[in-house]
């Protein structure tokens, strides 16, 4: 382990770059995703205005999503390279001793144990942090791609998977925000300020407290000889190249194959009160997914069931589509009017289909 007056080398430039990309993607997704989940909140509307509308917010959300997908792919390639080509141990895999360290750490903090547990290079807390983040972003990626391509997904799976994916996507995102805010940020900013992910070096004191066992041991070396590693590289690079190209091509196809009611490109002008739409083409599943992203939910409730002493329930509406769209466009005494630039005719059709089919509360 490299030591000098500035500290002990802990993270490589590649690891620090990965952390930076992950941080930018995560913060971007939080700032553009949570306002859509909580569209009825004032702070959400403030962020929407700062980004010049929900359309821009959706575009940015997808940009950060692509950045996160790229980071996941890069990280998985690096992991396979370390394990298969270099033969390094899987140092972040939880082991039985991590549970013992966690219990000893708890006993130490409640003064039931006199000494801190001597923990390895990656301790139990860092392993937990890693696996919560990795499984969380994989789940977000899977459900996000389903929401990006709802028609493609429902060609194979039941339509109910789309609202289910929306709930899982939003819930997992909120869980990660809370977990990282309470666990990760507390550990590196509040408990003690840890600069290692930015400088690459950790102080001797922090190393003794969090990774004392690693101070007395050398970092694991590749278990293969130089000749064997060269042979493995020659096999790894072409296979990895083909897999990466195939995954990137598949991802590009998924991200560009479908235009849905959730499309975020600028809408074209349409005729105001004479939309040439087939009312049978409305999709209740898409309408339900749209509801939480529009201002309607602020007054009529997150499930369109109305609010006490406020806007009425819209579920089970008996209005015809023509009556419904006219109400949307003209508004009422307390209801604002919505132009086709904010809610397109196609959006209105999907919303009406969902509301008329939804059971009354």
Image (cartoon, rainbow, N blue to C red):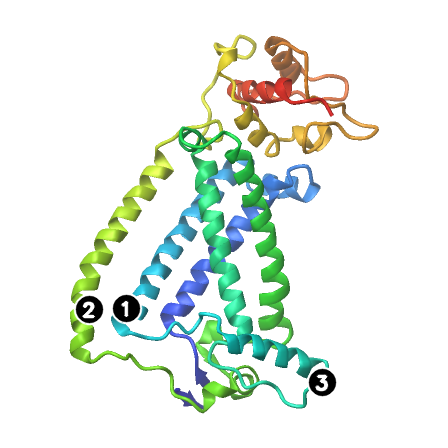
Report which residue position mark 3 lands on.
112
Could you tell me residue 38's position as x and y percent?
65, 41
How far apart marks 3 and 2 lie (CA) works out to 49 Å
Residue 84, numbered label: 1
Can you say whether 139 is above or below 348 in the image? below
Find residue 47 and report its image quarter: top right
What's the residue at 46%, 29% (across, down)? 266
Q: Quadrant of the N terminus?
A: bottom left
Residue 142, numbered label: none
Could you tell me residue 46's position as x and y percent?
65, 42
What's the residue at 58%, 41% (across, down)? 167
How far apart marks 1 and 2 lie (CA) works out to 8 Å
Q: Residues within 10 Å of mark 2 (few under 14, many from 20)?
A: some
Q: Nearer the viewer, residue 244 or 309?
A: 244
Can you say whether 19 is above or below 119 in the image? above
Q: How many numbered dots are placed on residues in this image? A: 3
Considering every residue shown, the one lying at the far front of the view is 96
Could you tell me residue 304's position as x and y percent?
69, 27
Say whether disc 1 or disc 2 marks the residue closer to the N-terminus.
1
Q: Is residue 339 visible?
A: no
Q: Nearer the viewer, residue 29 or 87?
A: 87
Q: Is residue 246 visible?
A: yes
Report which residue position mark 2 lands on.
232
Residue at disc 3, secondary structure = loop
Q: Residues within 10 Å of mark 1 (few under 14, many from 20)?
A: some
Find residue 49 and report its image quarter: top right
Could you tell me residue 181's position as x and y percent?
62, 61
What's the residue at 27%, 80% (across, down)? 223
């Amino acid at each position: 382990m490299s030591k000098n007056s500035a500290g002990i080398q802990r993270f490589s430039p590649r690891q620090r770059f990965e952390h930076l990309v992950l941080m930018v993607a995560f913060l971007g997704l939080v700032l553009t995703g949570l306002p859509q989940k909580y569209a009825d909140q004032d702070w959400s509307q403030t962020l929407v205005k700062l980004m010049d509308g929900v359309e821009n917010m959706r575009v940015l959300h997808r940009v950060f999503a692509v950045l996160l997908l790229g980071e996941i792919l890069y990280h998985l390639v690096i992991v396979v390279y370390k394990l298969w080509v270099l033969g390094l141990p899987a140092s972040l895999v939880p082991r039985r001793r991590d549970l013992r360290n966690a219990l000893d750490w708890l006993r130490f903090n409640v003064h039931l144990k006199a000494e801190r547990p001597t923990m390895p290079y990656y301790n139990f807390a860092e392993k937990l942090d890693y696996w919560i983040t990795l499984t969380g972003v994989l789940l977000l990626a899977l459900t996000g791609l389903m929401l990006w391509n709802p028609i493609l997904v429902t060609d194979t799976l039941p339509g109910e998977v789309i609202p289910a994916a929306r709930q899982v996507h939003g819930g997992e995102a909120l869980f990660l925000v809370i977990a990282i805010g309470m666990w990760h940020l507390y550990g590196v900013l509040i408990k003690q300020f840890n600069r290692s992910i930015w400088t690459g070096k950790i102080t001797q004191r922090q190393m003794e407290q969090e990774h004392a066992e690693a101070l007395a041991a050398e970092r694991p070396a590749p278990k293969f000889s130089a000749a064997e590693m060269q042979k493995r590289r020659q096999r790894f690079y072409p296979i990895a190249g083909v897999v990466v190209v195939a995954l990137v091509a598949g991802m590009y196809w998924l991200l560009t194959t479908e235009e849905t009611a959730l499309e975020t490109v600028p809408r074209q002008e349409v005729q105001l009160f004479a939309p040439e739409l087939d009312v049978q083409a409305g999709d209740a599943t898409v309408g339900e997914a749209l509801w939480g992203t529009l201002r309607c939910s602020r007054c009529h409730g997150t499930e369109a069931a109305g609010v006490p002493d406020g806007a009425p329930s819209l579920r089970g509406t008996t209005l015809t589509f023509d009556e419904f769209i006219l109400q949307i466009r003209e508004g009422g005494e307390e209801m604002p009017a919505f132009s086709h630039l904010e809610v397109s005719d196609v959006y209105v059709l999907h919303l009406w289909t969902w509301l008329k089919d939804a059971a009354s509360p």
